[in-house]
Image: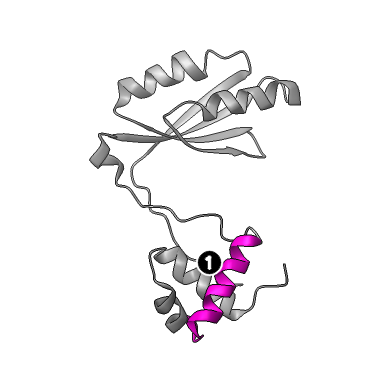
Amino acid sequence: MAALDRIDLALLAALQNDARLSNKELAGKAGLAPSSTLGRIQRLRDAGVLRGAHADVDPSALGIGLEALVFLRMVSHSQQQADPFRDHLLAQPEVATFWYVGGEDDVLLHVMVRNAAHLHDLLQSRIASRPEVGRVRTEIIFEHVRKPALPSYL
């Protein structure tokens, strides 16, 4: 894909803040004709720049009373162990986000649970008990705010 221009960035910024905008509304924000806007949006999807549209769901409305970041240090870094372990973690319904990270830890998880007992059970029975895990560190999330904006340096 060619480099993104200011119009592409304007469209991406608008969609990041509200993915339900109509093509006509997007065209107005970008200063384009609706047909040109539709073509640009399709090109951004085809190039993999736009990966989807997502609903912002309030976790507490679903009975999720606790969110946490779980930092894992693996015993071994072999691909033979890492891939099945990643698949195991992603199969856990409480795992909202998975990252491989560099630094002191190897894996960072964002987990969403009903309460502290649910978190304890998840960590003890399905994460810390795995042979791939050398250390687990958990940080409770008091507030989670997603900043739907592109970096200003783009």
Q: Amino acid at mark 1?
A: Leu
Q: Report which residue position mark 1 lands on.
A: 150
Which residue extends farthest front?
35
Residue 135 image point, x, y percent: 57, 21
Which of the 4 image quadrants contains residue 98?
top right
| Residue 94 vertical placement versus 2 (above, below) | above
Residues in magenta, as a range: 30-46
Residue under the image location 32 percent in, 48 percent down: 57
Under tag 1, what secondary structure?
A: loop
> Which quarter shows the N terminus?
bottom right
Q: Is residue 105 left or right of residue 139?
A: right
Q: Is residue 105 visible?
A: no
Residue under the image location 56 percent in, 81 percent down: 36
Q: Is residue 97 visible?
A: yes
Which of the 4 image quadrants contains residue 5?
bottom right
Residue 80 image point, x, y percent: 74, 21
Residue under the image location 32 percent in, 34 percent down: 66
In reply to whether residue 112 is colored magenta, the answer given is: no
The scheme the figure's colours follow is: one colour
Residue 4 image point, x, y percent: 65, 73
| Residue 14 vertical placement versus 136 (above, below) | below
